Every structure is written in C-alpha cells, then in structure tokens.
Image: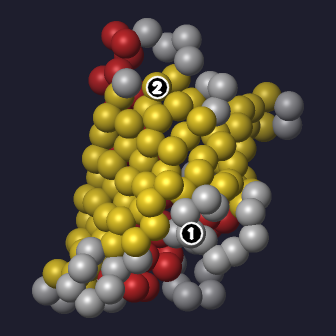
Amino acid sequence: MSRFRVARSVPLAPAEAWRRLTDWPAHGRQVPLTRTAVLTPGPSRVGTRFTARTGLGRLGFDDPMEVVRWEPPLGDRPGVCRLEKYGRLVRGWAEIRVAAESGGARVVWTEELAVRGLPRAFDGVLARAGRVVFGRALDGLLRRGPRN
C-alpha cells in the first residue's frame, strides 16, 4: 500500500474548512474527469456512502467509499473523518483532520491506497501522484467560496 499526506493551513474557521472538505460532490469537481455521487441521504455521518467515478465514457473506474468515523470539529477538539475505500480496483482509506490554529485551521489529509494489479515497486510513484492530485483538490475545495 502507498501512503501519502497533504497538509494545509488556511484562513478559515475549522467548521467552514470541515464543511468544504466533506462536501462529497464538490470533490468530483476538483479532480479532472471525476464525478462523485452520494449514495445515502444526508447529512453526512458514519455510514454515508459515495462513489467517485473517474474516466471518460465507458473507460473508467469507480472508487466507492464509506464514512466510518465522523467527528466534526467542536471548540478546541479537532475534527476527524475517516473513509474506507472498498472498490474492485482501489482499496485503502483516507482520513481528514481539521484543527483550529492561530488565524484559521490546519487541515491534514492522509491516504493509504492499493491499486489492484499495481506492483509494490510503484508505491512511491503512486504516493507522489496522490500528493499532487489530492493537494490540488484540497486547495480547490478550501479556496472556493460558499456558493461554488
């Protein structure tokens, strides 16, 4: 499995950073050629399921996920959301942490992935690609305004 981490400090209140990062359909708008469909009624909580579909037409793959930990930030307590990935091609987990810091919030996205059929020798390449792709997605989610 390949593990990577992306961290950002942002001038947003922790609750707002959390809201933006857990807007699952918005994730699909940040990753090229990806759409995200929420499969369970809101609001998000443990048990919420969604699928990120990446590809063009019939060529693509699904990345189904489920929220297994849901603790929004509250006061000085950091927020933690953990997702389990259970697709045929992509397996692993992702964890989003949002904590208050001077002037805003500190966000840390950690993910561990395994891609079916991809040898472990490619773990480093997968981690670097993950940092780039998820770093851009994180930046886009945290930068957008409340109506975007």
Mark with earlier residue (1, 2): 1
Q: Residue 29: x, y in percent?
A: 64, 61
Name the amino acid type tagged 1.
Arg
Residue 1 position (above or below residue 130): above
Q: Nearer the viewer, mark 1 or mark 2?
A: 1
Q: Which residue is label 1 attached to?
A: 45
Residue 71 occupies which quadrant of the picture?
Answer: bottom left
Q: Which residue is label 2 attached to?
A: 114
Task: State the residue in front, 143 or 52.
Answer: 52
Quadrant that contains the C terminus? bottom right
At a point 64% along the width and 40% down the height, the residue shown is: 63
| Left/right of residue 95 with respect to residue 83 in the rendered view | left
Q: CA distance from mark 1 to mark 2?
A: 25 Å
Q: Residue 44: x, y in percent?
A: 60, 71
**Is residue 107 in sight in this rendering?**
yes
Task: State the residue in front, 45 or 20.
Answer: 45
At a point 59% along the width and 36% down the height, the residue shown is: 86
State the residue lying farthest toward the right.
58
At a point 62% along the width and 87% down the height, the residue shown is: 147
**Is residue 134 in sight in this rendering?**
no
